Image (cartoon, rainbow, N blue to C red):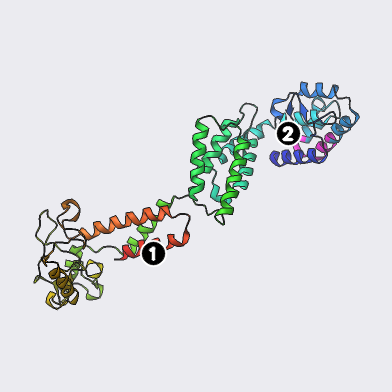
Amino acid sequence: GFPPFLTDARVRAREGRWDVNGPTGICTVNDRNICTNYHDITEAQATAAFNNRLNDRAVQNAKAFFRALKQSITGTIHATLFGQFANAPENEDGVFLWIRLTKFTITSSFHLSVTAFQEILEFSPEAHKFHIPTINTKLLNLFVLATTPHRQVQDAERIQHTVTVYSCIQQPQSWATWVAHQVDRIEEGHVVNHQDFMNSAALKYAKIHAKEGGFHASTHTIQEDVVAMLKKAKRKNTTTDPKSNEKLDDANGDPSKRPTRPPFLKYYKVSNAPGAKEHKVGDTKKWNDDTYYYCDCPHHRGRIRWHKHKAEDCTTRKTWLAQQDSTDTPAQASLGDGTTPANADAGSTDGPNAPAAAAEDASALLANAYALLSSNSAVQELVADALTALNEE
């Protein structure tokens, strides 16, 4: 195919030192490199370069290039160039043969350009394991293949495509912050050379790798990972609908499928309506043939309010009452979540499900803490455990 052939020619030119600057070099015509800007060079310009080539070493290099190309070409292209009199090269000049060869492959090159440009648009850094040097090399190759005589991929466009690929990497946070800063610099016109931009990215990658013991990359933000973790925990601990409990309590329900814990353990109001009355000591509920008694003590583990023992027999409540007596505070305190008065914010604490709102607030605080601890994986794991435990309550 044409792309491997193009690469092989560039390698052969470097090995034979045909691309050096000076009188012995043959790869520059009208200040354009024949290996990268071949579409911009005409056969007339290649012929003029041949006629002006006086250095014996340069003449030998041109002949060597010609023989290497002739031996490499096979199939239809070889038959067209050397089997038809009108197309046969007049001189053993590798540069002229190279330009003519590229003209014959213009259709293949156009198809290749479309394919390469599509690969640029769909480029995934994850496919290259987030290794920035490899990503840079692959993008450079695609930029060359996407170039045609009628469409040049200029520096500004290359920079834009490159920063788009870099922006797909959301973690580590230090990388995402650096990319965001580069976007601002690009908009301000401070980044104009795509190769320099890629070199600075490779340098940043190396610094992060050395400082953090690796480049722990991801296409998701820390916040998205936290949300996914919370959803996973909630799927494991789906809240049971009270209406479904009523159906299970029916005589026709299957006892083996009933929940082991009643859904009202944390309820401290009689209904979800605004201004609803709070339960009081002495209230009872029946569930699965068991009697549950309401306790007004806010210090039970997990903010549980309903127990199988009476409030008068609760040791935790007795201790709480003793502390209330020592401070001359009424024993019947309205503490919806154990820390704040139940009617302090009717919009968020009224109703049986008020503890769930408090749990969501705690989840949000832990999620923020998780995001701020991106550089400390050990503490992050502890916060993650706390999030999971909170959603399992």
Question: At 62% from the left edge and 41% from the top edge, which residue is drawn?
Answer: 199
Quarter placement of the C terminus: bottom left
Asked if the magenta segment contains residue 304, the reply would be no
**Residue 71: x %, y % from top left:** 83, 39
The 10 Å Cα crowd at callout 2, few under 14, some 14 to 19, many 20 or more, is some
Question: At 75% from the left edge and 38% from the top edge, which residue is drawn?
Answer: 10
Q: Main secondary structure of the magenta part?
A: helix
**Residue 90: x %, y % from top left:** 85, 25
Q: Quadrant of residue 61?
A: top right
**Residue 365: x %, y % from top left:** 33, 55
Q: Pointer 1: what residue?
A: 385
Q: Pointer 2: what residue?
A: 35
Question: At 14% from the left edge and 55% from the top edge, which residue is drawn?
Answer: 343
Type of amino acid under label 1: Asp
Identify the magenta region. 65-77
Farthest residue to the right: give it.
Answer: 56
Question: At 83% from the left edge and 34% from the top edge, which residue is drawn?
Answer: 66
Is residue 227 shown to the viewer in this render? no
Residue nearer the viewer, 7 or 225: 225
| Depicted 84 relative to depicted 293: above or below | above
Would you say 389 lies left or right of 124 here?
left
Quarter placement of the N terminus: top right
| Depicted 207 relative to depicted 162: above or below | below
**Residue 178: x %, y % from top left:** 51, 43
Q: Answer whether labels 2 and 1 touch (C-beta < 8 Å).
A: no
What is the C-alpha distance between the residues marked 2 and 1? Answer: 57 Å
Residue nearer the viewer, 186 or 316: 316
Would you say 12 lies left or right of 284 here?
right
Type of amino acid under label 2: Cys
Q: Quadrant of residue 236?
A: bottom left
